[in-house]
Image (cartoon, rainbow, N blue to C red):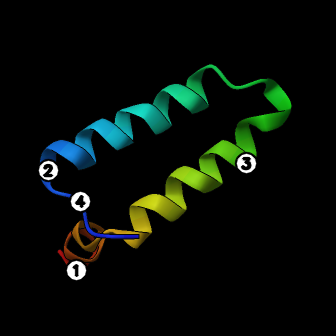
């Protein structure tokens, strides 16, 4: 996945959080995994983890 600029990152993250919030109970784990994988794939996560 390509690296997103800050506006794209904010929008995509918001969408993922909504997916988690409104997911059926049995889908929450899958949605959270997708969110975490997305965040880890972005360069910003590497900078945050180092600090």
Q: Name above or below for residue 17 compared with residue 5.
A: above
Mark 3 Cα-neighbour bin, 10 Å: few <14, some 14–19, many ≥20: few
Q: Name above or below for residue 33 compared with residue 10.
A: below
At 57% across and 23% down in the image, what residue appears? 21
Mark 1–mark 3 Cα distance, whole angstroms, equals: 27 Å
Mark 3–mark 2 Cα distance, whole angstroms, equals: 25 Å
At 15% across and 56% down in the image, what residue appears? 5
> Which one is earlier in the sequence, the residue at label 1 or at label 3?
3
In front of the other: label 4 or label 1?
4
Mark 4–mark 1 Cα distance, whole angstroms, equals: 19 Å
Residue beneath disc 3: 30
Closer to us: 50 or 2: 2
Mark 2 Cα-neighbour bin, 10 Å: few <14, some 14–19, many ≥20: few
> Looking at the rendering, which quadrant does residue 4 occupy?
bottom left
Residue beneath disc 1: 50
In front of the other: label 1 or label 3?
3
Badge 1 marks a residue whose secondary structure is: helix
Mark linked to residue 6 = 2
> Which one is earlier in the sequence, the residue at label 3 or at label 2?
2
Mark 2–mark 4 Cα distance, whole angstroms, equals: 6 Å
Badge 2 marks a residue whose secondary structure is: helix
Q: Is the residue under label 2 in contact with that under label 3 (CB below 8 Å)?
A: no
């Amino acid at each position: 996945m390509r690296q997103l600029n800050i506006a794209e990152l904010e929008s995509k993250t918001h969408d993922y959080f909504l997916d988690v919030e409104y997911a059926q109970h049995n889908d929450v784990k899958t949605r959270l995994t997708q969110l975490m994988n997305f965040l880890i794939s972005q360069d910003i996560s590497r900078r945050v983890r180092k600090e």
